[in-house]
Image: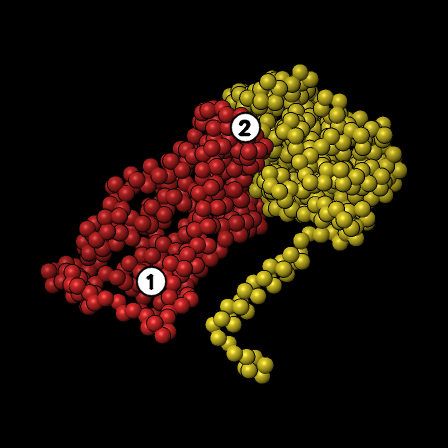
Chain colours: A red, B yellow
Amino acid sequence: MSTTTTRGVAQPAPAKASPARPRRGLRGNATFNFWLFTGPFLIGLVIFVFVPIFWSVWLSFFDARYTVTPSKFIGFDNYKQILTNSNFPDSLLTFTVFAAFIVPTTWALSLGLALLVNRLRFMRAFFRSVFFLPTAVSYVAAALIWKMSIFSGVRFGLMNTVLGWFGVENIAYLANPSPPWYWVVIVTLRLWIQSGFYMILFLAALQNIPTELYEAAAIDGAKPGWQTFRHITLPQLRATSTAVILLLLVAAYQAFDEFFNIIGQNATWAQTPLMELYKTALGTSQDYGAGSAGAVILSLLICLVTLIQGKFMGFGRGEDSK
Amino acid sequence: MSAMSSTNWNRRNVMKAAMGLAAAGGLAACGGNNGRGGGSGSGTALTQYFHAYGEAGTEQAIKRYAAAYKKADVSTNWITGNNFESALFAALLTKKAPDVFEFHPQLQLVKSGQVADLTDLINPVKDDFNPNDIKSHTVDGKIYGIRMIDDPQFFYYRKSMFEKAKVEVPTTLEELIEAAAKLTTNKVKGVFLGNDFTAIQNVIIWSAGADTINANNEIAYHTDGVVEGLKQLRQLFTSGNVLLDAPTDFWDPSSLNQGLCAMQWGGMWSMPAMQKALGDDLGIFPFPKIGSAGKQSVYNGGWSIFVNAKGKNVEAAKEYVKWLWIDQKQYQEDWATSYGFHIPPRTSIANSATKLKTGLPAEGVKLFTDYGHFDNIAYDQTMQTAFAEVIASSVRKNGNPEAALDTCDKKVNVELKKLFG
């Protein structure tokens, strides 16, 4: 293509605009166009992301109860409080375990769905839509359906009705943490709502794999199925897999909506880090200092986990990583 | 169509039209559904925050009262969902903070200068208020809120189910556990205590003969009686005789009305709906006593009105709350008795409220009088959350009550130190 063949070759000077009809306005001013299209987003980014981040870091060193403009500097006391006299460390531990389970499970399910719909020869669009549609449902709405309709503990809850046909007693999925049936509720909801989105990412990646690779593998004697998947498909999906796992990890640590609506704030189990920070800063204590300290710790942890994951999976290595 | 086609739709015109539409949209939004109560007042604009009450007609009532006030234009923000507290606190930090809001008495709100001193409004009628309501809103001799309603909470039960199972009204926690077992069938559970048991967390303390915090602002809930109560509740929780994961929580009468349980913890606000559904097949009793040192108890919840001390119109807001919650007795009675049942905190109104004079409502008032416990302004929400975790750990999860209370003590002591030094 011309873009590659002209590299390194002296380019002709760009044609100057005719002095008789100067290029004006939106078409002629690249700088103006740049700011026109990116300016609003940059302003939003600064106001809604960078200012809160810096404000949060600043608040974490102050006694900020019932105020976000405190005056009493207390050093690292908020960090000490959130790490020693709150449920925040427990929530971090719980959600590291949760992430260790939900990330590979969602990855495997999304990839499986992508492989499935990629092979379909009829009703392909229908099945893609069916699996993708849950992504459009809000976590709050889905959580309420799961909690009040499907996994309600009374005899007319959907699951209990079905189990009742087989003589199983009503199960309180959410109120009683022993055995921890609540994880079934949470995990099924999360898989249902998330997998479709990641399936689309995998589907796009699958369709980008050159068919020549499969043809060459077939000529070399590779058997279709697991052998081809193991040695051709999976390595070709590495970049997408890395991105998917990164997104899933961040989503696991940032879980809030469905846990807030399904488990509630009055439990000592399945309290996500964000729920603990919400309770500290916005819910009952109104302690913005301690809440901010926790937010800083959580942000650093997510950065650390991302870097470690990038180190192991080669995030950002681009084509070389394939 | 013809006019449209004759217009010269170049890009500049399209952009102008789009900007015009955006501006018009913005203006339309300003005049849209802003929660205004239809106030006919002029001049000062006031905003009040209310959580969404479940009883039909309450939102309209609050807006109707506001509309009747002529000295200011009062807008009502009726906050649905279970995050009223968060929405309120977040709003109080902004320039769009409400001038008037309902909440519960909280010492931290006073200490942070968030609520205005209303002593001068209440003093002339102080003797007409329930003294316990005045006490629960008083800090260093100043009164910081006006009680709107008292909401006693107790057990409701189905008389017919008790008769059929030959069960007497329980007066001890052991008897309650036994009754729940006898009342449980394959379709009906013996008792419903709310989905997470936190609705009864204060009455456990009082029924065990303890208190939340004492007069010296020290922990008073960590007693042997409370530990015993927690163990018994664990026994009840695991018995299979408790309704769990109900579609609605304790504040809604549906569980009892729909025959899911024979006894339900609830508030007096549910009484009209329960009477409508069940007729005379309905009785009430206080939370039974726990252990030998215990005594039956009733929790008096309720809501109070506060003025935002950092608002732009503090004096106008004070004038409004005085007009509504002190001067307008007909509205106060309407608010307390026309929707759900509540007890008016003004003695004169409570005495004249005919709906509370006979039958089950009168029994509710008697339980309130005989066994009622009021909010302690110093036992704040951080402490309540810490105790909710005791319930979660030792009743819903099989944790050691002593260890759970020790953990709670640490959190409460940090909070007490913050409040009192």
Would you identify the image quadrant in which residue B112 lies? Answer: top right
Q: Nearer the viewer, residue A265 or A281?
A: A281
The chain containing the residue under callout 1 comes to: A
Please give left or right for residue B275 compared with residue B308 in the image.
Answer: right
Asked which secondary structure carries label 1, the reply is helix
Taking depth in this image into account, of B64 and A208 the one nearest to the observer is B64
Neighbours of disc 2 within 10 Å: few (<14), some (14-19), many (20+): few
Whether A127 is drawn above or below B190: the answer is below
As helix, strand or loop, the secondary structure at mark 2 comes to: loop
Residue drawn at point x = 44 percent, y = 43 percent: A50
Discs 2 and 1 lie in a common subunit: yes
In the displayed orientation, state which residue is furthest to the left: A220
Asked if residue A61 lies left or right of residue B188, the reply is left
Q: Label 1 is placed on what type of residue?
A: Val
* Disc 2 target residue: A71
Residue B252 visible here:
no
Q: CA distance from mark 2 to mark 1?
A: 59 Å
**Closer to the eye: label 2 or 1:** 2
- Give the camera-side residue of B284 and A255: A255
Q: Earlier in the sequence, mark 2 or mark 1?
A: 2
Protein chain holding label 2: A
Residue in view at x 36 percent, y 74 percent: A20
Residue A10: percent from left, percent from top = 17, 63
Q: Total label count?
A: 2
Q: Amino acid at mark 2?
A: Ser
Which percent across, then down, holds residue B21? 57, 66
Residue A313 visible, this orientation: yes
Q: Is residue A212 above or below residue A277?
A: below
Q: The N terminus of chain A appears in which quarter of the rendering?
A: bottom left
Query: Which mark identifies residue A117?
Result: 1
